[in-house]
Image (tube, rainbow, N blue to C red):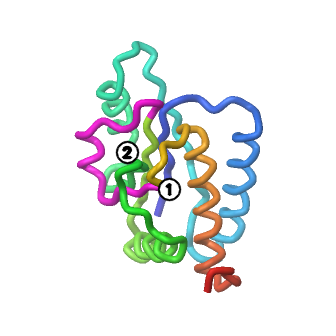
Amino acid sequence: MKIVIAAVGRLRKGPESALIADYLDRFAKTGRGLGLPPVQILEIEDKRGGGMAAEAELLARALPDGAAVVALDERGQQPTSPEFAARLASYRDQARDLCFVIGGADGIDAALRERADWQISFSRMVWPHMLARVMLAEQLYRASTILAGGPYHRE
């Protein structure tokens, strides 16, 4: 299994970058014993300014062959953390690669969004795509702790 975050934009050094690195490091340590690999980040940049369609084409090229695609979109389902963890475990148990897709400032092109196996949202509110990366990294770490049987404060 391979887990990839394909995201539009380059993340500069700063607080968001530090948070992502911390959560993904925690995920790698916790996930190792659960059969979850470290997360790979692929940053996509449309240097020609072609908008969402061009970004979607670049993102589509970055998708691992046969991977389950999870699009982060404000119109998506809003799973609980345990539901997210269960879905992650399901992909792991199927030995299926997994690719989370985060669009640019304007979101994800409809054609790529429709291609996704699952569309999720962290809120009906719109979040900056760089913060969406932070929230995804945190939820991956939280999912690994839930799957490891750690205490979950909501249960």
The residue positioned 29% from the left and 46% from the top of the image is 113
Mark 2 = which residue?
63
Query: In which image quadrant can residue 12 be found?
Result: top right
Q: Which percent across, then down, holds residue 147?
A: 58, 80
The residue positioned 51% from the left and 73% from the top of the image is 85
Query: Label 1 amino acid?
Result: Phe
Q: Is residue 8 above or below residue 30?
A: above
Q: With 45 as the anchor, is 69 left or right in this view?
A: left
Query: Label 2 amino acid?
Result: Leu
Q: Is residue 105 magenta?
A: yes
In 3D space, how far apart are the residues under numbered discs 1 and 2 (Cα atoms)? 22 Å
The residue positioned 41% from the left and 75% from the top of the image is 90
Q: Is residue 125 magenta?
A: no
Mark 1 = which residue?
122
Q: Earlier in the sequence, mark 1 or mark 2?
A: 2
Q: Secondary structure at mark 2?
A: loop
Please name which of the two marks, 1 or 2, marks the residue nearer to the observer.
1
Q: Which percent across, then down, holds residue 140?
A: 58, 63
Q: Which percent across, then down, holds residue 36?
A: 56, 68
Residue 87: mark: none
Q: Which percent across, then down, holds residue 111?
A: 23, 40
